[in-house]
Amino acid sequence: MTFSSPAWLLALAAVPAALMLYSAARRRRRRYAIRFPAVETLRAAAGPASPWRRRLPIGLLLAAVTALAVALARPHVNQHVAVDEASLILVTDHSGSMAAQDVQPSRLAAAQRAANAFIDRLPNKARVGAVAFSDSPDGVQAPVTDHQAARNIIDAQNANGATATGDALALALQLLHGATPKHPPAAIVLLSDGAANAGLDPSTVARQAAQEKIPIYTVALGTANATLPNPDPFAAPLDVSPDPQLMARIASLSGGRTFNAQSADQLSSIYKDLGTRLGTTTRKREITAAFAIGGLVLLLFAAVSSTRWAGRLP
């Protein structure tokens, strides 16, 4: 919960102060009480008195003060609501290292399966696009409500070439510029397994994405020390370990989050979580009226209870 005018919360200090004054007044009243021989007779005539009746009016009054102080501070709560017009782009690496089989049946096949599961989690009206890349972006689909168009790009990939991550992210940003009406949420989901070794610096593009308030969620796929057979039969296998540090830096600079997936199950779980996360947005809702009404109702009950039992002997 957040507050637009938190200074009003200082009024809450009056609650414990009032309790201390009330307690001191009760002790002082008992100290100077005058003994009256017929008090038992009067008590019997008045009927049994419950201790809570004496405390209820002051308790209701203090609760009302608390509620009204919070209302004056204008409280807000965050609500997760579905986003029908979000614009998202899946940026998928299909460089040669994606042929590695440390993630079964292969990194690329697992990524394609998980990307389709991700799309399944999105609202039907969400705009989804795709950028496939290796040496350069070579499969492009602008965000549209026809989700099958993005699936076609994802499913048509084959593992080959280098890794031009920065170029692919820059293209995704350009596509989002022309696809988002007014100010709906927009995001990029990047899946890659290796260090960027061609094209633009991904960190530069990530900073630009942050300026445009477009977070990049990154998924580093693969296991450390993974290898591929070397085309030269007499040379050592090729190291195709993922680069989670680069992926984390891209996510951090852009305001997104990073994930590591070392198995097909982990990858699917990440994409399902992202689908739910990016299919909703957090909005603030002011709840001042609820506290104000509650405070007034408590004041009314405090007045009624005080009037009802004010004439009873304590």
Image (cartoon, grey):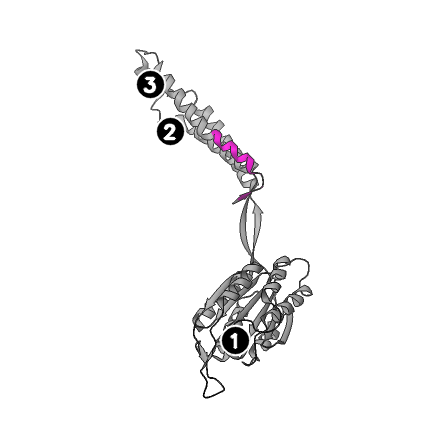
Identify residue for label 1: 112
Three-letter amino acid code of the residue under disc 3: Arg
Horizontal and vertical percent position of residue 202: 59, 66
Label 2 crowd bin: few (<14), some (14–19), many (20+), radius 10 Å = few
Asked where in the image residue 93 lies, by quadrant, the reply is bottom right
Identify residue for label 3: 43
Of marks 1 and 3, which one's residue comes earlier in the chain? 3
Q: Indicate yes or no whether the magenta region holds residue 86.
A: no
Horizontal and vertical percent position of residue 16: 44, 30
Query: In the displayed structure, does residue 174 sit left or right of residue 194?
Result: right
Contact? badges 2 and 1 (CB < 8 Å):
no
The C terminus, quarter of image:
top left
Identify residue for label 2: 52
Q: Residue at x 53, y 62 (%)?
A: 249
Residue range of the region highlighted in magenta in the rendering: 2-14
Three-letter amino acid code of the residue under disc 2: Trp
Q: Nearer the viewer, mark 3 or mark 2?
A: 2
Q: Is residue 52 visible?
A: yes
Q: Is residue 144 visible?
A: no
Residue 238 drawn above or below residue 125: below
Question: In 3D space, how far apart are the residues under numbered discs 1 and 3 (Cα atoms)?
Answer: 83 Å
Q: Residue at x 45, y 79 (%)?
A: 227
The furthest residue to the bottom:
233
Three-letter amino acid code of the residue under disc 1: Gln
Identify the secondary structure beneath mark 2: helix
Horizontal and vertical percent position of residue 41: 31, 15
Give the main secondary structure of the magenta stretch.
Answer: helix
Question: In 3D space, how far apart are the residues under numbered discs 2 and 1 (Cα atoms)?
Answer: 67 Å
Label 1 crowd bin: few (<14), some (14–19), many (20+), radius 10 Å = many
